[in-house]
């Protein structure tokens, strides 16, 4: 008989990239494929959880991932998550959310100009931090997980993110893991950190959920 220790639990996961449109044709994004987020969704579903994935535009296989809520921009994802987080026992912010958006997106294609183009950006909301802030005022016990994609000082930056955002666990990784089947990551909790060897993302998903399960 398959062990399903998360039966009766609800898990909310963000996955994939976001897109910040400059005009109807062009947008700013990143190289996330959603592979890690959907690996987490399948692993949580295998453990018996009811899973909801709020996913940006991506090419990862979405089969057996539970309920998928498609979004495009960071603001779309922020709204979708804030509508759903209260029902979740575990919230995992895996999406590679764009930190910035254009102040003035054009409704028409911007034509080439010899004078150049000056663009102004404003910060997007921090989705997992907003969930953590709201969760602190709520009596229901939840496990909140963030990701830290870092180019340098990855463990230190992950520890800072854990404390600053009020999370239970941060998964630190590096740009080389983006869009690839394997990843080398570290799990960072309060007062501890564990660096993992390179492994496929399905196995990494289970390592992450094992750490989450210890806190449930």
Image: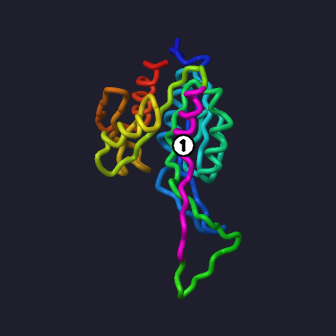
Q: Please name the residue that numbered disc 1 is placed on.
A: 15
Which secondary structure lies at badge 1? strand
Colour pattern of the rendering: rainbow
Q: How many marks?
A: 1
Which quadrant would residue 191 be assigned to in this image? top left
Please tell me whether residue 88 belongs to the stretch shown in magenta: no
Q: Residue at x 42, y 30 (%)?
A: 169
Q: Residues within 10 Å of mark 1 (few under 14, many from 20)?
A: many
Q: Residue furthest right?
A: 107
Residue 114 in the image: state x and y as whole percent: 53, 88
Query: 49 or 123: nearer the eye?
Result: 123
Residue 79 in the image: state x and y as whole percent: 66, 44
Q: Residue at x 49, y 18 (%)?
A: 216
Q: Is residue 151 above or below residue 67?
A: below
Query: 94 or 60: nearer the eye?
Result: 94
Residue 153 in the image: state x and y as whole percent: 29, 46
Side of 136 relative to 80 (left or right) = left
Q: Is residue 205 above or below residue 55?
A: above
Side of 85 relative to 210 (left or right) = right
Which quadrant would residue 194 be assigned to in this image? top left
Q: Residue at x 59, y 44 (%)?
A: 55
Q: Residue furthest top?
A: 1
Q: Is residue 210 above or below residue 13?
A: above
Side of 150 relative to 40 (left or right) = left
Q: Residue at x 53, y 33 (%)?
A: 132
Please tell me whether residue 132 belongs to the stretch shown in magenta: yes
Residue 213 in the image: state x and y as whole percent: 46, 20
Query: 6 or 121: nearer the eye?
Result: 121
Q: Which residues are magenta?
A: 118-137
Side of 88 relative to 175 (left or right) = right
Q: Residue furthest front?
A: 137
């Amino acid at each position: 008989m398959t062990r399903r220790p998360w039966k009766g639990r609800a898990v909310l996961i963000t996955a994939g990239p976001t897109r910040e449109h400059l005009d109807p044709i062009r947008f700013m994004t990143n190289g996330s494929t959603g592979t890690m987020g959907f690996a987490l969704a399948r692993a949580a579903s295998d453990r018996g959880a009811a899973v909801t994935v709020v996913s940006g535009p991506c090419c990862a296989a979405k089969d057996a991932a539970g309920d998928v809520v498609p979004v495009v921009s960071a603001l779309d994802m922020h709204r979708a998550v804030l509508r759903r987080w209260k029902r979740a026992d575990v919230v995992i912010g895996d999406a590679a959310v764009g930190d910035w958006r254009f102040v003035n997106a054009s409704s028409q294609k911007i034509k080439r100009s010899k004078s150049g183009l000056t663009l102004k950006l404003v910060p997007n909301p921090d989705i997992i931090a907003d969930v953590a802030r709201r969760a602190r005022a709520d009596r229901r016990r939840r496990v909140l997980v963030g990701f830290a994609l870092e180019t340098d000082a990855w463990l230190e930056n992950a520890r800072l993110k854990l404390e600053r955002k009020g999370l239970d666990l941060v998964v630190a990784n590096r740009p080389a893991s983006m869009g690839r089947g394997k990843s080398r990551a570290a799990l960072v909790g309060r007062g501890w950190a564990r660096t993992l060897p390179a492994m496929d993302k399905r196995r990494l998903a289970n390592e992450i959920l094992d750490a989450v399960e210890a806190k449930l």
